Image (cartoon, grey):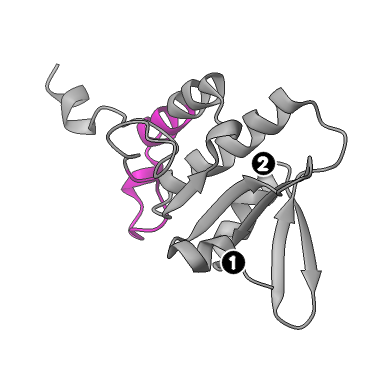
Amino acid sequence: MSFLHEEYGTDAEIYRKPFSTEVIADCGDPRAHEVLATCGFVKKTVPPHYVWHQLPEGLPEEEQAQRATRAACLLRARGFDANVAEDLVSEEAIAAVRGEVRRHRISGAASSSSPAAGPVAPPARLDTTASAAPAAPSTSDHRSR
C-alpha cells in the first residue's frame, strides 16, 4: 500500500479514490489527523503501519468538495504542504475558510509563544495542483490602515 503524500513528497493529499466515490485524505503527521477529523474525515487503519482518512459514504458531491477543500485550506493555514484534487475544490469553502483564518488571527491566536500554535499565511494564489487557498492579506496591511 502506497500513499500519495509519500509519492508526491507532500504532507497531505486529498483526492477521490480512482473508480470510486470515496474521498481519501492521507498524511503522516498526527497534527494533520486532528484537522482532518474536525472536517468530518473518519480515521481508517490497517495495522500496524497504514493510517488514512475517508469522508463518510453517501455525502453529496458538493458536501464532499466543501469538506475536502476546508481540510486542505486548514492544513495549509497550519503550515502543512497539502493538496486537494481539482475535482474536489469548492470556491465557497475557500472563501469561508479564508474568513475563518482571518478571524482567528485577529482574535490573537497567532500571538502565542509557540510558532505552530497559530495559522500561517495561505499560499499566494489558487493552484489546485499545489495549493488549496489563495493568500490572505498580511496582518501588517491591517495595521497600516
Residue with the most extreme front position? 19
Q: Quadrant of residue 16?
A: top right
Q: CA distance from mark 2 to mark 1?
A: 15 Å
| Amino acid type indicated by mark 2 | Cys
Residue located 27% across and 35% down the image: 124
- Disc 1 crowd, CA 10 A, few/some/many (<14, 14-19, 20+): few
Quarter of the image for residue 64 reads: top right
What residue is at 39 percent from the left and 58 percent from the top? 116
Which residue corresponds to the image point at 65% horizontal and 35% vertical from the top-left? 67
What label sits on residue 30 in the rendered view?
1
Q: Position of residue 118 (x, y in %)?
A: 40, 48
| Residue 7 placement (x, y as % from top left) | 50, 67
- x then y, percent, for residue 49: 70, 80
Residue 69, relative to residue 16: is it above or below?
above
Residue interval drawn in magenta: 100-120
User: What secondary structure is marked by label 2?
Assistant: loop
Examine the structure image and report whether residue 118 is included in the region drawn in magenta.
Answer: yes
1 lies above or below 56: below
- The x and y percentages for residue 86 are 53, 35
Whether tag 2 and tag 1 are in contact, CB under 8 A, the answer is no
Q: Which residue in the protein does label 2 denote?
A: 39
Q: Residue at x 45, y 24 (%)?
A: 99
Identify the residue at the far bottom of this view: 48
